[in-house]
C-alpha cells in the first residue's frame, strides 16, 4: 500500500500522480540549474536570450545583471527599459510582473509564495506581485507575496515590503512603512544602458 509523507494511505492512481509530479519537478529543477549557470555568463544579450527561451518575458532594452536566481521563470514578465541588479531572486510561481523603467538594485528578492503559518500542513500560500513603472527598489529589499508597488514608488535598501505601496510613496523599514513621497510625479526618464559585464 502506498502512503504520502504524512502517512495517509494513497490509491495506486493517487500514487501514480505523485510519482509523475515528482518527475516533473526534477525536470523543473534541472531548468532552474541551467538558469543559475546562465547567470554567470558576462554578456547581457546571451543571458536574455537564454532566459527568454526558458519562458521569462523580457521587454526591449531590459537587462538582468549576473547571478540572478529564478523560481518558476515562466511566470515572470519584465517591461521595457528595466534593469534588474546583480544577484536578484525572482519567484514567478504565482506571477511576477515588473513594469517598465524599473530600477532594481542588487540582491533584491521577489517572493510570490510563502508557507501559511496557520495551516496544519504548513501548505503554501501563493499571490502575485506587481511592480509599477518607474519604481526604484534599493539593495537587499524583500517584496513578499500579494504586494503591489505603485507607479514611481521607492523602496529603501533592506526594506521588507508586506503590503501594497501607493504611487510615488517612499517606504523603508521592517516591515516597510511610508517615510516620504516622491515630489516629481511626471516621470518620463529612460534608465540607459546597464553595466556591460555585469
Image: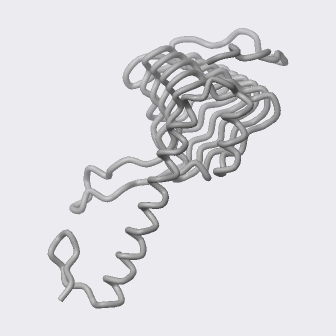
Quarter of the image for the N terminus: give it.
bottom left
Which residue ends up furthest to the top in the rendered image?
183
Q: Is residue 37 left or right of residue 47?
A: left
**x then y, percent, for residue 19:** 36, 76
**How many numbered marks appear?**
0
Residue at (31, 59) in percent of width and height:
123
Report the colour scheme: one colour
**x then y, percent, for residue 171:** 52, 18
The residue closer to the viewer here, 103 or 42, is 42
**x then y, percent, for residue 101:** 75, 24
**x then y, percent, for residue 161:** 46, 29
Q: Is residue 106 left or right of residue 119?
A: right
The residue closer to the viewer here, 41 or 73, is 41
Q: Is residue 179 left or right of residue 103?
A: left
Looking at the picture, does residue 148 appear above or below residue 178?
below
The residue closer to the viewer here, 16 or 129, is 16
> Residue 16 is drawn in which quadrant?
bottom left
Quarter of the image for the C terminus: give it.
top right
> Residue 174 is drawn in which quadrant?
top left
> Residue 132 is drawn in which quadrant?
top right
Residue at (49, 47) in percent of width and height:
32
Residue at (64, 29) in percent of width and height:
64
Residue at (57, 25) in percent of width and height:
66
Amino acid at each position: 500500500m502506498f502512503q504520502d509523507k504524512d502517512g495517509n494511505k494513497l490509491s495506486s492512481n493517487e500514487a501514480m500522480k505523485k510519482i509523475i509530479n515528482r518527475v516533473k519537478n526534477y525536470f523543473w529543477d534541472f531548468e532552474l540549474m541551467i538558469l543559475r549557470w546562465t547567470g554567470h555568463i558576462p554578456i547581457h544579450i546571451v543571458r536574455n536570450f537564454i532566459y527568454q527561451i526558458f519562458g521569462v518575458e523580457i521587454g526591449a532594452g531590459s537587462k538582468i545583471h549576473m547571478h540572478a536566481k529564478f523560481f518558476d521563470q515562466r511566470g515572470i514578465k519584465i517591461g521595457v527599459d528595466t534593469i534588474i541588479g546583480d544577484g536578484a531572486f525572482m519567484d514567478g510561481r504565482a506571477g511576477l510582473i515588473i513594469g517598465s523603467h524599473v530600477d532594481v538594485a542588487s540582491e533584491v528578492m521577489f517572493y510570490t509564495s510563502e508557507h501559511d503559518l496557520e495551516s496544519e500542513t504548513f501548505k503554501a500560500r501563493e499571490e502575485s506581485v506587481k511592480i509599477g513603472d518607474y519604481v526604484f527598489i534599493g539593495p537587499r529589499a524583500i517584496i513578499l507575496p500579494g504586494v503591489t508597488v505603485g507607479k514611481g514608488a521607492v523602496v529603501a535598501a533592506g526594506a521588507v515590503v508586506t503590503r501594497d505601496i501607493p504611487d510615488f510613496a517612499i517606504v523603508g523599514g521592517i516591515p516597510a512603512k511610508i517615510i516620504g513621497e516622491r515630489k516629481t510625479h511626471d516621470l518620463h526618464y529612460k534608465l540607459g544602458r546597464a553595466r556591460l559585464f555585469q
